[in-house]
Image: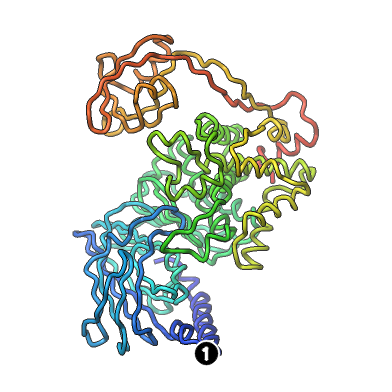
Amino acid sequence: MTHLSSIKNKSKAFFNFLAASISFCLLINSPAFAQQANQQWHYAITLDPGSKIIHVSLKLSGNKADTIPFKIPAWTTGYYQFMNFDKNLSAFSATDGAGKPLAFTQSTPGTWKVAAKHAKVLMLQYDIKANRNFVAGNFLDENHAFISPAGVFLYAAGNIKQPVTLTIKQFEGWNRIATGMDHVAGDIATYYAPDFDILYDSPILMGKLEALPAFKVNGIQHDFIGYKMGSFDKQQFMDDMKKIVENGSAIIGDIPYNHYTFLAIGPGGGGIEHLNSAAVAFDGNVLNTAAGRIKLYSFLAHEYFHNYNVKRIRPIELGPFDYENGSKTEMLWVSEGFTVYYEYMILRRAGLTTSAELISQLRTNLLNYEAKPGHLYQSATQSSTDTWSDGPFGRTGDEVNKTISYYDKGPLLGLMIDLKIRHETQNKKSLDDVMRTLYHQYYQKLKRGFTPQEFKQVCEQTAGVPLTELFEYASTVKEVNYHKYFAYAGLSIDDTVKTQPGAWLGITAQNRKDTLTVTDVDWQSPAWNAGIRNKCKIMMVDGKPATADDLKLLSTNKKAGDVVTVDIIKNGKPEQVKLVLGVHNAKSFEISPVLHPDQLQQEIYKSVFDGGH
């Protein structure tokens, strides 16, 4: 079990919250307010690993409307895609306290209207299929379960601020439950949330789990609990995680939670941030290589810093949430993109990467953005709003070339705004000051998110000058003048077009289940023009079984104009294509120091790239 030390304080806060809510409602002559304050919602779940079913029951007592529309969210916060949770719900039933059936209708795929008139107690029963092993989904097997609460627990329309309790029956043989929620005092099987927003923001990992050595920062406990975490130096890992949390929280200068838990759900991909936890796919075996360690630490730093940037420092659209229709914002280039920038900064400040590795990370984003034609079609703000239809990394298929990822342009904009602020203020202020101002002004003082205009104003007030050009880079497809901004830190960037060595095929591929599979195709490359696309399987090259190494050797063993015959499987059908190898003209975007930096350039470089502040 986790977080027992904070139960007393949290329980006191919870009951104070209830008392304040009830007192407030008694002062207002409004049935709606009275109804919410006097209701008691208690959920219970049991697990059936064999059928991958979560059995859910709800006991609702207190004042109720004659008809209650129960809804399941269409998405979960932190993952800006519709999840179709309603498709996993079955066997819905409603009864009163005596077991008498209550009539209900399913008015929409995600809404069940229950006739609750005269029922002092309302009981719901339903099942959730838990077969998606993903940080935004629900999954259950014989050894563990991961629960994304938005996909499990129904809320009543207009009643999101209702407190709720949840009892979890642990499956036999399992040893641990980990979640950001706290126990109800005296009952280690029951958890509470002050409202449904908190419930939905508190994923649950349970099963045969391992807890790594916990650490404290400013007296606050941080746990790392997971399933099948792999073989690695676990004490060293947690020592490094402490450095990540120390340097991440130091950017803002405040820790806003009473405890924090990393929930490692097992090998895979993806992570979702929460107010006092993060659900992350995790395979500790990658820590045994330098490249794998940096990649994993960056990922974990990213999810951790999200507890500030997006959960608390947030665009105004991201709370209160619209669980039915989604909450769209044009500011994900800040919420996600700046978090990428800060994951790099956190690792550098923690001494977990070098300045060369930091520059390499940023150059990778720059190449991802500039090397594809999407930057000619889609702005960072458009990418943010379009993610609901495009996906978090842009469109797929041929349309991929008309989109960008805010995960790539966002950190570049964060870097350039940071460098501009430092330049204009003689390195006395930085993007850190922007983030702190947003945190104190909007999260702590006004208790709301910021508008795009308010974000721009804070940046400009911090810099002391207009930042018109930089914000045009965010909202348009205007060509970016990297030279100007990188020079503030004494860096030059090579954006001249050069002929790349070797013959050009235009395919990136890797082995997946013993088959060479295309993972990327350069736009208008010989491969692209021949019809090869992502996910095509490459079976033969010039009549020989295809390997990743042989594919790479084509660029050195062949020359432009040579013809290559490639046997592929595309959309499940075999196809043979002939490619005429070409010449690749591209920009390297190599980043290097200028010859004679002035004092300010040296100071800015040291502050940003040498782990300063």
| 121 is higher (above) or lower (below) than 365 | below
- Closer to the camera in the image, 595 or 22: 22
x 28%, y 76%: residue: 124
Q: Where's residue 120, x and y in %?
A: 32, 89
| Residue 148 visible to the viewer | yes
**Horizontal placement of 343 versus 253: left or right?**
left
- Residue 181 rendering spot, x and y as whole percentages: 44, 68
12, 477: nearer the viewer? 477
Q: Is residue 415 above or below residue 90?
A: above
Instruction: Please identify the quarter of the rendering in which residue 314 is found.
Output: bottom right
Residue 343 visible, this orientation: no
Picture layout, residue 160 above or below residue 18 = above
**Side of 441 where 499 appears, left or right:** left
Residue 325 appears in which quarter of the rendering? bottom left
Q: Which of the 4 image quadrants contains residue 77? A: bottom left
Which image quarter is the N terminus in? bottom left
Residue 102 on image: x %, y %: 24, 81
Q: Give the camera-side residue of 534 and 516.
A: 534
Q: Tell me where residue 278 appears, x and y as whole percent.
A: 46, 56
Crowd rating for badge 1 (residues with CA inside 10 Å; few <14, some 14–19, many 20+): few
Which element is circle 1 on?
loop
Q: What is the total number of numbered labels drawn onto the structure image?
A: 1
Residue closer to the observer: 18 or 191: 18
Report the coloring of the rendering: rainbow
Query: Left or right: 489 with respect to 556?
Result: right
The amino acid type of the residue labelled 1 equals Asn
Residue under numbered circle 1: 29
Left or right of residue 399: residue 497: right
